[in-house]
Amino acid sequence: MTVTERATPARVPDARSPFMRLADLLGDTPPGMPAINLAVGEPQHPVPPFVAPVLAQHTAAFGRYPGNAGTDGFRQAVAGWLGRRYRLPRPIAPLTEILVLGGSREGLFLAAIAAKRLAGERPGKPAILVPNPFYAPYSAGAVAAECEPVYLPATAQNGFLPDLDALDEPLLARTVAFYLASPANPQGSVASRDYLASAARLAQQHGFMLFADECYSEIYWKEPPAGALEVAGNDFANVAVFNSLSKRSSLPGLRIGFVAGDKRFIKPFLDLRAVSAPQVPVPAQEVAIHAYNDEAHVEENRALYRAKFDLADQIIGNRYGYQRPPGGFFLWLDVSQQGGSEAAALKLWKEAGVRVVPGSYAARPQADGSNPGEGYIRVAMVQDRATTAEALHRMVKVLG
Ligand SMILES: Cc1ncc(COP(=O)(O)O)c(C=O)c1O
């Protein structure tokens, strides 16, 4: 489908978080069996052993306000990690091209406001491109920035990535930012280096920001996914990548992440953040320095996910259109034959005690009224191996 000027649906969709909507859907309905939560993408793997000692060593720093940009040590550790992990065109400059974030969610949200300001006047209403389905803060950020979120279908037909050739010139001319997750939540699709290069080229040609959400970059099956900084040229022009320790190091509660890329964006983003964003406690940044310098715990973490996807291969097999995703930690299952998104999620809760997200809640209706998430459920493989096996067996039994 061509994404045109008229791509926005007329009726106002439910913009609440998928989890708030799920709570409403399930209401007071008791779980049919002891509950297993596979709804929230919150890793339940063990907290790495270095966290407590590093925090203990730096407790005195809780007595100071942290700076806005991040400590030099934190930004140097991130620069080092990016240099080891990706084929960067040149080493990234820690102090001008990297900022600390209080987890990537707040950064992704606020980035829309900074991108709108940076873009200046546009012909028509400023637009922000959002893959559909998507991570909720993208469109929340677009709305907060008084931009139009324009939803780009990312369906099985196009490999679960937006079709870049479908973007027409008038739309690109008013675009101020493009959010792109690779590996994607919920589908687990991974953008190739060529795809990322095309997206970065579009951003550079049309003067908008490509916001590459790479928070699942370390959770992959075979090959480490490419990163957008690899293809953005020597200045990382028009590209900012977002990442965090939430998935990589199973530290969602530490609330620490970073943004890295084009310094023409990073500087005004820092100006905005200095009056709006949460500062990140220095002891947490010290933990992060440790985490970015250690790959052993990340490999262990990845191995745990692989073992759980092995279980899905065995237990789910070829039901519900399941194909093992190249990245991320979600199953994106087609339950259109089992009643669709909401009905299947409700049934799984009522009869199996398994909590999953209706796929329709992770997406918005397109102009033609179709919702690319309808007919799917999202299953987060975040519990331990035994719990995951139990949940998958129950799902197959109940859904058939
Ligand atoms: C696609 C995507 N991006 C970003 C985040 C934000 O994670 P955090 O704020 O913990 O870094 C999440 C969390 O679930 C996510 O799924």
Image (spheres, rainbow, N blue to C red):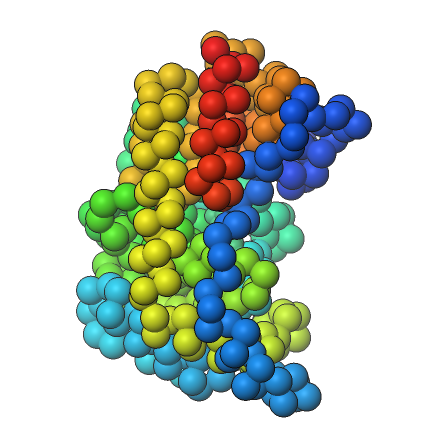
Q: Position of residue 128 (x, y in %)?
A: 49, 47
Q: Quadrant of the N terminus?
A: top left
Q: Position of residue 292 (x, y in %)?
A: 37, 71
Q: Is residue 2 left or right of residue 198?
A: right
* Residue closest to the far front: 386
Residue depicted at 64% across the width and 32% down the height: 35
When asked about the image quadrant of residue 357, the answer is top right
Depth order, front residue of 91/306:
306
Q: Position of residue 332 (x, y in %)?
A: 43, 30
Depth order, front residue of 120/273:
273
Residue depicted at 68% across the width and 21% down the height: 32
Residue 117 seen in render:
no
Q: Is residue 71 left or right of residue 299?
A: right
* Residue closest to the far right: 28
Q: Is residue 282 left or right of residue 211?
A: right
Depth order, front residue of 9/378:
378
Q: How many marks?
A: 0
When asked about the image quadrant of residue 232, the answer is bottom left
Depth order, front residue of 122/337:
337
Image: 398 above or below 31: above
Residue 389 seen in render:
yes
Residue depicted at 32% across the width and 34% down the height: 310
